[in-house]
Amino acid sequence: MRNGLKIAVIGGGSSYTPELIDGLIKGQHELPVNEVWLVDVEEGKEKLTIIGRLAQRMVSKAGAPITIHWTLDRQAALKEAAFVITQFRVGGLAARIKDETIPLKYDVIGQETNGPGGLFKALRTIPVILDICEEMEELCPEAWLINFTNPAGIVTEAVLRHSRINKVIGLCNGPISISRGIAAALNVEPARVRIDFAGLNHMSYGLKTALDGEDISSRVIAMLAGRGEDGQMIRQLTGVEWVPEFVEALGVIPCGYHRYYYQPRTMLAAMKREAAQTGTRAEVVKRLEDELFALYQDPNLNVKPKQLEGRGGAYYSEAAVQLMRSIYTDKRDIQVVNTRNQGAIAGIPDESAVEVSCVITREGPRPLVMGELPVAVRGLVQQIKSFERVTVDAAVSGDYRTALLAMVINPLVPSDAVAKQILDELLEAHRAYLPRFFGD
């Protein structure tokens, strides 16, 4: 890679972008970025302009030697880029609202990346990411594709199986948030804590926790179960209340998204109640984003506003910049990313995407060998991987029956008949963004 890196951000009009710009400013000493190109679609032009101007003010205040561009011309943004960051949402928050509200009508969890909502976000996203990959092959063939677009694991799976882009890494802030939460509960610096993660995106487990190289897994499990004086603190940090005996029997750290699978009735009831009272999470996020963009337009604002923390996505910029920096400098530190399995987790095809602790090198992630997952979690991970694989097939082919099969495979959907009802309604609701299904 040459000095003076160009970064292209697909979905540059996202409310998260100031978080990324802040991270790039802070990481200048190790990641010498001199151009950031923010690109979006016509529907996002106004937000893109607001974000572009804020980004300019941020780099100017910081005195960072970064030139900010914003454009609707994706090819101009991609040309000679060193890193391509994807963080787009096909159909915007309006599409997410449908993903969350329609399944609830059938007493099925409606969630952005899990169940029917995750399926339809993938169906809308995969054709677009594959188009981006084709353009990258021509315009920036040596670039690394860093994908934040959800569902990150399924999107990474699609790129690995249906494009010629090998330099692709899916990234999620979940593992780093868990690690930071545990470090805070232990009252130690984050660098002293290392957790070996293995599984899939939003379906990964912390298999082993070490503090200064010493195995403290049993202590952390006890804390997560609410045992000991630190127990309540760590439960607050993870945001999930677990039955203590269950966590102790599980013996590994679950992620927050596991609550949809281990606590489905509780989560469904909570989501229906929240939808009736304050709106679905997507509707809440839309209100937050309206407030954020009102702030972003202030010509006196030249830093990342504190209110952005309410949007979620903690440590997003840190994870992104840390990953790019480690590739650029051949740092060989350990990070948790979505990458090709390559034998890291037994029982999952080598070519499939997994979320696993990796050594990050100039040549990309080198997964740590985790072997067999514990028998208690292996089956659920395998079922979700089957769902991911069939979802990718449906997105690429536009085949109705394959999409139905994917819906039924997902453990959050109770039957084939209910799956068909949800599928039919969501297909019609998202017709404009599913040309492969409708031939439009």
Image (cartoon, rainbow, N blue to C red):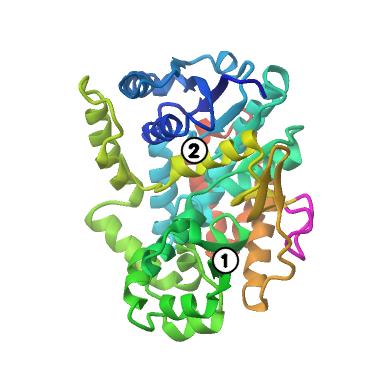
Judge whether 197 appears above or below 319 on screen: below
The x and y percentages for residue 76 are 57, 13
Judge whether 123 appears above or below 63 on screen: below
Q: Residue at x 58, y 54 (%)?
A: 201
Categorize mark 2 by other alpha carbons within 10 Å: few (<14), some (14-19), many (20+).
Answer: some
| Nearer mark to the viewer, of 1 and 2 | 1
Residue that lies at the very extreme toward the bottom in this rendered image: 245
- Give the main secondary structure of the magenta stretch: loop
- The reply to whether residue 399 is visible in this rendering is no
CA gap between label 1 and label 2 equals: 33 Å
Q: Amino acid at mark 2?
A: His
The x and y percentages for residue 342 are 78, 53
Judge whether 57 appears above or below 147 on screen: above
Task: Name the element at disc 1.
Answer: strand
Q: In the image, is residue 255 part of the stretch drawn in magenta? A: no
Q: Which residues are magenta?
A: 341-351
Q: Which residue is mark 1?
A: 205
Q: Is residue 31 left or right of residue 308?
A: right
Q: Which residue is mark 2?
A: 430
Residue 96, label in figure: none
The x and y percentages for residue 176 are 49, 54
The x and y percentages for residue 136 are 67, 23
Q: Residue at x 49, y 30 (%)?
A: 29
Judge whether 221 appears above or below 410 on screen: below
Q: Quadrant of the C terminus?
A: top right
Categorize mark 1 by other alpha carbons within 10 Å: few (<14), some (14-19), many (20+).
Answer: many
Q: Amino acid at mark 1?
A: Tyr
